[in-house]
Image: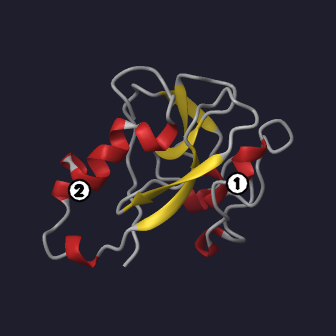
Amino acid sequence: MNAIDTNAGGWEKSELRQKMNSGKIWNLMPSDFQPKVKSVKKLTNNVSGTDKDAAVTATTDKLFLLSYSEIVPTSYWASSYPWTSSEGSQYEAFKGKVTNNDNTNSAIAIGDRWWERSVTPDYSTAFLNVLGNGNPTSCDHATFSRCVCPVWCF
């Protein structure tokens, strides 16, 4: 996500977001794919994980990562960190398939960890990721290498 261990500025200020929307990752996309991609507004806690009452704000992205609330039906941290329920609604593709907000889900298990765009609640150095077994509540330092599963809209 970042070259230094911080989630300050969230997804909006992350180095990975820059690479996905105009840098290294965007440039890996086929030239006939790029003009078909529509920019979309994505809601995210773009403050940090330590702010319990952080307001989510919108970013405009061509390629983006899924947020925790776009994957799960309810937030594991909703009572302590209300913003974890406000980064978008669970996508239709996951309804009835991803039912555990803090446990394994075969529908999103790819055998390795993959980044979410959500900062980790209660930490200033980490972002959420999905474990290889499909558990969406894992977290790692912003400097760790994890799989990137880009999402886009046509």
Dot 1 alpha-carbon crowd within 10 angstroms: few under 14, some 14 to 19, many 20 or more: many
- The kind of secondary structure element at disc 1 is loop
Asked where in the image residue 121 lies, by quadrant, the reply is: top right
> Where is 39 relative to 69, above or below?
below
Point 20% across, 62% down: residue = 29
Q: Nearer the viewer, residue 73 or 121?
A: 121
Cα distance, mark 2 to mark 1? 27 Å
Residue 147 left/right relative to 53? left
Tag nearer the camera, 2 or 1: 1
> Where is 69 relative to 4, above or below?
below
Residue 77 left/right relative to 98? right
Q: Hey, what amino acid is under mark 2? A: Trp
Marks 2 and 1 close (CB-CB < 8 Å): no
Picture coordinates of residue 92 (x, y %)? 63, 75
Picture coordinates of residue 82 (x, y %)? 78, 44
Locate the C terminus by quadrant. bottom left
Dot 1 corresponds to which residue?
86
Point 35% across, 63% down: residue = 62
Picture coordinates of residue 116 (x, y %)? 51, 46
Point 17% across, 56% down: residue = 28
Picture coordinates of residue 34 (x, y %)? 21, 70
Residue 113 visible here = no
Residue 26 left/right relative to 73? left
Dot 2 corresponds to which residue?
26
Locate the N terminus by quadrant. top left
- The kind of secondary structure element at disc 2 is helix
Q: Hey, what amino acid is under mark 1? A: Ser
Q: Nearer the viewer, residue 24 or 13?
A: 13
Q: Earlier in the sequence, mark 2 or mark 1?
A: 2
Dot 2 alpha-carbon crowd within 10 angstroms: few under 14, some 14 to 19, many 20 or more: some
Residue extending furthest toward the left: 31
